[in-house]
Image (spheres, rainbow, N blue to C red):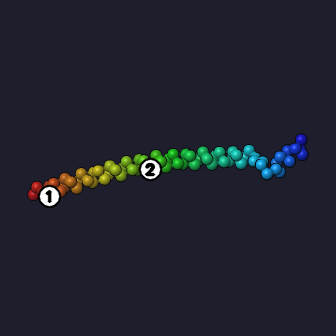
Amino acid sequence: MKKTLEKIKDSKGFVSLEVIAIAVIIIALAAFVMFKFRTTAESSTDSVDQQISGTMESITSDAEDTANN
């Protein structure tokens, strides 16, 4: 039994379960980070859009006030 396990372990195609587990953990962490980044990017884009809209309204109203005087 020991010799069989050693042969399997020493063969080229052997991948230990620990390596597979670490790969799964890294992939899960990467997916989580990408999801959080996308959510943060969307919320910051919305915030910037609101700021630009407010600034444009302010500029438009100032221009109208200046033109009326």
The residue beneath circle 1 is: 66
- Could you give the CA–CA distance between mark 1 and mark 2, rounded to whole angstroms? 37 Å
- Give the left or right position of residue 45, taking residue 23 as reference: left
Residue with the most extreme left position: 69
Identify the residue at image location x=61%, y=47%: 27
Q: Is mark 1 on a helix, strand or loop?
A: helix
- Give the left or right position of residue 4, taking residue 51 as reference: right
Front position in the image: 11 or 50: 11
Q: In which quarter of the image is the C terminus?
A: bottom left
- Give the left or right position of residue 28, taking residue 60 as reference: right
Q: Where is residue 28 in the image (x, y as percent from the top left)?
A: 60, 45
Q: Which amino acid does label 2 sit on?
A: Ala
Q: Position of residue 36 (x, y in %)?
A: 50, 47
Numbered marks: total: 2
Q: Where is residue 17 in the image (x, y as percent from the top left)?
A: 74, 44
Q: Where is residue 5 in the image (x, y as percent from the top left)?
A: 85, 44
Mark 1 and mark 2 residues within 8 Å of each other at the beta carbon: no
Few, some or many residues within 10 Å of mark 2 (<14, 14–19, 20+): few
Residue 64 figure quarter: bottom left
Few, some or many residues within 10 Å of mark 1 (<14, 14–19, 20+): few
The residue beneath circle 2 is: 41
Residue with the most extreme top position: 1
Residue 59 figure quarter: bottom left
Q: Which amino acid does label 1 sit on?
A: Thr
Identify the residue at image location x=47%, y=48%: 38
Identify the residue at image location x=36%, y=52%: 48
Q: What element carries label 2?
A: helix
Q: In which quarter of the image is the N terminus?
A: top right
